[in-house]
Amino acid sequence: MHQVGPDKGRVSLAAQLALLMTVQLAKIILSQEKNIQRLNELVRSLREQLLQCRSSNETISNSLSSLADIAEFEKQQILED
């Protein structure tokens, strides 16, 4: 008759523990991957907003420059009269 020794039970418990730890680590990794995806989406959105701000700033800067040119031209016209 074959007897089951105490090591068989210990190996089984160790294997179960290792499997449980592997499952928990996999859950953690998946959660972190989701967090990374969210962060990447936020970075992408912030880059788009930054580009829009830069474009708006360039438009405003160009408009102010044009207004300054017009004001300088009008000032010269007044001084010449």
Image (tube, rainbow, N blue to C red):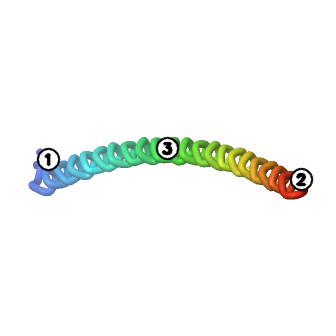
Q: How crowded is mark 2: few (under 14 residues within 10 Å), some or many (20 or more)?
A: few
Kind of residue at disc 3? Leu
Q: Which mark is residue 81?
A: 2
Kind of residue at disc 2? Asp
Q: Mark 1 points at which residue?
A: 2
Is residue 52 toward the left or the right of residue 30 in the image?
right
Q: Which residue is drawn at 14% across and 47% down?
A: 2
> In the rendered structure, are the residues bearing label 1 and label 3 in contact, judged by CB atoms less than 8 Å apart?
no
Mark nearer the N terminus (2 vs 3) = 3
Depicted 7 relative to depicted 51: above or below: below
Q: Which residue is drawn at 66% across and 44% down?
A: 56
Q: How far is mark 1 from mark 3, CA to CA?
A: 62 Å
| Residue 5 vs residue 73, the one in the foreground | 73
Q: Name the residue under label 3.
A: 42
Is residue 56 toward the left or the right of residue 80 in the image?
left
Q: Is mark 2 on a helix, strand or loop?
A: loop
Mark nearer the N terminus (2 vs 1) = 1
Kind of residue at disc 1? His
- Nearer to us of marks 1 and 3 is 3
- Nearer to us of marks 2 and 3 is 2
Q: How crowded is mark 1: few (under 14 residues within 10 Å), some or many (20 or more)?
A: few
Q: Is mark 3 on a helix, strand or loop?
A: helix
Give the farthest residue toward the right: 80
Q: Residue at x 12, y 49 (%)?
A: 4
Mark nearer the N terminus (1 vs 3) = 1
Residue 25, given in percent of the width and then of the height, sits at 32, 50
| Residue 5 vs residue 16, the one in the foreground | 16
Is residue 47 toward the left or the right of residue 9 in the image?
right
Quadrant position of the N terminus in the picture: top left
Q: How far is mark 2 from mark 1, CA to CA?
A: 120 Å
Depicted 6 relative to depicted 40: above or below: below
